[in-house]
Amino acid sequence: MKHLFLLIICLAIFKLAAAQKTIDTLNFGFENQTGSAGFADRWMKMPRKSNFTFKLDSNTKHSGRYALLIEESNPSDQIFGCAARKLQHISGKEIEVRAYMKLENITGVMGLMLRIDGKDSILAFDNMERKRIRGTINWRQYSVKLAIPEGAETVYVGGILSGTGKLWLDDFEVLVDGNAIR
């Protein structure tokens, strides 16, 4: 009986340790969703009212159960659709965002988005527009990097689409001074 009890305790500890390795508290892999919104926890849609569709896709993904899909659903005056994750209390000299993206028939601007805000204004911004990535491309890791300016208070990381086509995002990673945040 003692051996069985010890075995059960060991298995429980092993299971907890294994589960802790897979928990993604920042939800950079879009695996966590609660409620009826059908959107990834801790992520927001920008602008809030948008003619772009945002959905978790369980069929097309880089890893895990889901990737995030952004696509234009109704052409109009809307100029972009962005899914973003807000991070606060980031300090260091440089921040880098990496993620895997898959593109299908992209005609406009798309890319990773990195925005650093101060108290009253945007201090730094990059959305990969200068890279002019278009067309159809299978899963590939991309990155964007910015210096963290003096007065930085809030960082937004995400993916952005302006134009037509489909953009899938998965497996984000954020590094500050070369160290991954978790």
Image (spheres, grey):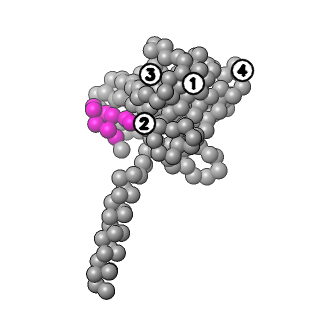
Q: N-terminal of the two: label 3 or label 1?
A: 1
**Mark toward the viewer: 1 or 2:** 1
**Magenta-colored span:** 172-181
Q: N-terminal of the two: label 2 or label 3?
A: 3
In 3D space, how far apart are the residues under numbered discs 2 and 4 (Cα atoms)? 29 Å
Q: Which residue is mark 4?
A: 76
For label 1, the crowd category at 10 Å Cα-Cα, with few meaning under 14, some 14 to 19 and many 20 or more, is some
Report if residue 56 is visible in the image. yes
Q: Which residue is mark 2?
A: 172
In 3D space, how far apart are the residues under numbered discs 4 and 1 (Cα atoms)? 20 Å
Residue at 29% across, 77% down = 6
Secondary structure under tag 1 reads strand
Q: Position of residue 137 (x, y in %)?
A: 50, 23
- Left or right, 13 with respect to 104, comes to left
Q: Which residue is mark 3?
A: 125
- Asked if disc 2 and disc 3 are in contact, CB closer than 8 Å, the reply is no
**Mark toward the viewer: 2 or 4:** 2
Q: N-terminal of the two: label 1 or label 2?
A: 1
In 3D space, how far apart are the residues under numbered discs 4 and 3 (Cα atoms)? 25 Å
* Amino acid at the residue labelled 4: Ser
* Amino acid at the residue labelled 3: Phe
**Mark toward the viewer: 2 or 3:** 2
**Mark toward the viewer: 3 or 1:** 1
Q: N-terminal of the two: label 4 or label 3?
A: 4
Is residue 91 positioned above or below 6 on the image?
A: above
- Asked if disc 4 and disc 1 are in contact, CB closer than 8 Å, the reply is no
Q: Which residue is mark 1?
A: 104
In 3D space, how far apart are the residues under numbered discs 2 and 3 (Cα atoms)? 18 Å
